Image (cartoon, rainbow, N blue to C red):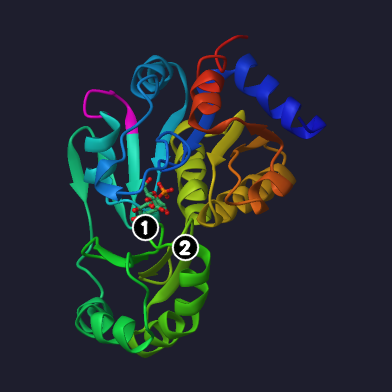
Amino acid sequence: MTAVGADGLDAIRTDPSRAVLGFDFDGTLAPIVDDPAAARAHPGAAPALARLAPRVGALAIITGRPARVAVEYGGFEGVDGLVVLGQYGLERWESGMLTEPDPPPGIAEARAKLPGVLEAAGAPPGTFVEDKAHALVVHTRRCAEPQVALDRLRSIIAALAERTGLAVEPGRYVLELRPPGVDKGRALRSLADAFAEKRGAPPSAVLFAGDDLGDLAAFDAVDALRAEGVPGVAVCSGSNEVTELADRADLVVDGPDGVVELLGTLLDG
Ligand SMILES: O=P(O)(O)OC[C@H]1O[C@H](O[C@H]2O[C@H](CO)[C@@H](O)[C@H](O)[C@H]2O)[C@H](O)[C@@H](O)[C@@H]1O
């Protein structure tokens, strides 16, 4: 644990009612599995979030998943006060209400071209596409050599993104084509700013926990808030697939088991 991270945790425990907490879903609250449709939150996640929600300033899941999917797979429907920011902040779910924009026009073109592009690139057996309406995700986890497959597809997915006005979000054996202009850092920042506006004072502390490259933007937001005087903690849900987050984190825990254990200690003031 870094010294500034320990200060951030102390600040949360001292004044939880003004703390802003954000959690990634896959790999952080839900163990990674081969089939994205089979992912489910750790059984302790929803109960721990339900205990925290009424006691903290803001509590959010910030995920690449569609918000409705995260709510369903997480079992978060009954967690009063929880906000789910889906598709990297494009969508907002709160108290059963979902707000989402129309999909960007480039998605339809990318959807039409992607099968041909994958075939022309010689995408290995096991490669498949997850269609999230606002984004398309190319998965290689089920290939015989997932990293080799991902590396083979990187440049053609980047070229397709360029042609269709989309951004590429790389992740754990995935390359995602998604709308530009959103990321988890902006999403976390918007939560902190909304809290400050509503309460007339900045949060007492901010925490974000994640496991994948898309979570680094939220770590950047924790750093930026810290530079403005808000104590912060960046938590890495550790895995042997991604090392970049552990290098940047204040605290590394043992995957979703470790994250759920941490959730249970955040009110131990
Ligand atoms: O922001 P997150 O909540 O971490 O979502 C990011 C992507 O996660 C999903 O893929 C990851 O989890 C799958 C299920 O465990 C796994 O099979 C895959 O290899 C992982 O990359 C999801 O399918 C994507 O749509 C999300 O963007």
Q: Quadrant of the N terminus?
A: top right
Instruction: Tell me what residue is drawn at x 25 percent, y 76 percent.
Output: 107
Q: Is residue 123 above or below residue 87?
A: below
Q: Main secondary structure of the magenta part?
A: loop
Query: Does residue 81 show up magenta in the picture?
Result: yes
Q: Marks 2 and 1: CB-CB under 8 Å?
A: yes
* Label 1, residues with CA under 10 Å away: few <14, some 14-19, many ≥20: some
Q: Secondary structure at mark 2?
A: helix
Instruction: Tell me what residue is drawn at x 81 percent, y 30 percent.
Output: 3
Q: Is residue 39 left or right of residue 195?
A: left
Instruction: Tell me what residue is drawn at x 31 percent, y 40 percent.
Output: 39
Q: Is residue 251 left or right of residue 136?
A: right
Q: Which residues are magenta?
A: 76-82
Inspect the image, locate mark 2, and give the three-letter code of the amino acid beneath it: Pro
Query: Does residue 51 show up magenta in the picture?
Result: no
Which residue position is annotated with label 2? 146
Instruction: Tell me what residue is drawn at x 21 percent, y 29 percent.
Output: 77
* Label 2, residues with CA under 10 Å away: few <14, some 14-19, many ≥20: some
Image disc number at residue 90 = none
Inspect the image, locate mark 1, and give the three-letter code of the amino acid beneath it: Arg
Residue 265, image x, y percentages: 57, 14
Which residue position is annotated with label 1? 142
Q: Quadrant of residue 54?
A: top left
Mark 2 residue CB less than 8 A from any atom of ligand 1? no
Residue 46, image x, y percentages: 34, 23
Near-viewer residue (256 or 46): 256
